[in-house]
Image (cartoon, grey):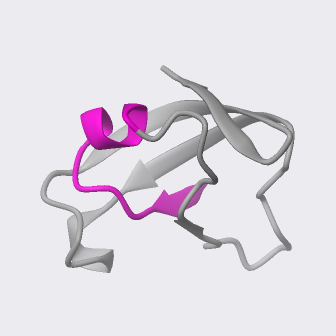
Amino acid sequence: MLHVSYPSKKDLKDNVGKPLRYTETSHFGPEYRRDGELIVAARPFLSSVVKREFFATVIMENGLIKSVK
């Protein structure tokens, strides 16, 4: 699961069409994929930017956020 640096899920949705701001958290290799579906989490104790914890599914296309569920 990738950690994202957005204050809220709404802010993540407002960034559709832009690159994803994330931090890799896996000890088993990179999880980020330029294209496809990513499961992400925003955890307040990992970043001072995040106001509330949230989870989302992000669809990536050509390295840009296509949609957020």
Q: Is residue 32 magenta?
A: no
Q: Name above or below for residue 28 compared with residue 54.
A: below
Q: Image quadrant of residue 1?
A: bottom right
Q: On the picture, is 13 further left or further right than 39?
A: left
Identify which residue is drawn at 48% across, 20% down: 69
| Count of marks placed on residues | 0
In the image, which residues are magenta? 1-14
Q: On the picture, is 67 further left or further right than 55?
A: right
Q: On the picture, is 6 further left or further right than 23?
A: left
- Position of residue 36 measured from the top left corner of the image (x, y, whole percent): 82, 32
Identify which residue is drawn at 23% across, 75% down: 45
Q: Name above or below for residue 30 compared with residue 33.
A: below
Q: Nearer the viewer, residue 31 or 36?
A: 36
Identify which residue is drawn at 53% across, 33% down: 16
- Position of residue 3 measured from the top left corner of the image (x, y, whole percent): 49, 62
Identify which residue is drawn at 30% across, 37% down: 9
Q: Nearer the viewer, residue 57 or 1?
A: 57
Q: On the picture, is 45 further left or further right than 56?
A: left
- Position of residue 19 measured from the top left corner of the image (x, y, whole percent): 64, 53
